[in-house]
Image (cartoon, rainbow, N blue to C red):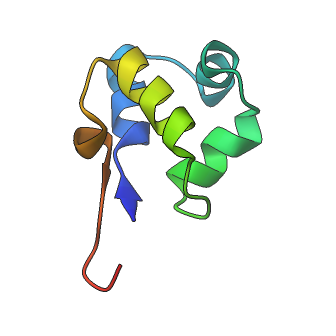
Amino acid sequence: MKNNLRVERAIKDITQEELAKIIGVTRQAINSIEAAKYVPSTVLALKLSAYFGKPVNDLFYLEEGD
């Protein structure tokens, strides 16, 4: 699964640390999600969706083979 979190963060001009505090997770969690090493829970994906004001499918998408 791929994601657009890094791009969305850049648009809002916030750091991983700032996003982590807003969402209630660690900076390492945000880093792992952006690096596609960790798939967020439904709750976390919905929190990110609400913060960025975008549907979950705009933030996260499947790759061929997922």
Relative horizontal placement of residue 47, taking residue 38 as reference (left or right): left
Q: At x 24% / y 45%, what residue is drawn?
A: 57
Front residue of 59/8: it is: 59
Q: Residue furthest front?
A: 42
Residue 24: where, in percent of width, then height? 70, 21
- Residue 46 drawn at (x, y percent): 43, 30
- For the image, the number of numbered tags is 0
Residue drawn at x 50%, y 43% as measured from the top left:
42
Taking depth in this image into account, of 66 and 9 the one nearest to the observer is 66
Instruction: Residue 13 in the image: state x and y as whole percent.
Output: 43, 16
Give the residue drawn at x 66%, y 25%: 20
Residue 23: image quadrant is: top right
Which quadrant holds the N terminus? bottom left
Relative image position of residue 30 (x, y in whole percent): 62, 40
Q: Is residue 22 left or right of residue 42?
A: right
Residue at 58% across, 21% down: 19
Quarter holding residue 27: top right
Q: Residue furthest bottom?
A: 65
Placement of the C terminus among the 4 image quadrants: bottom left
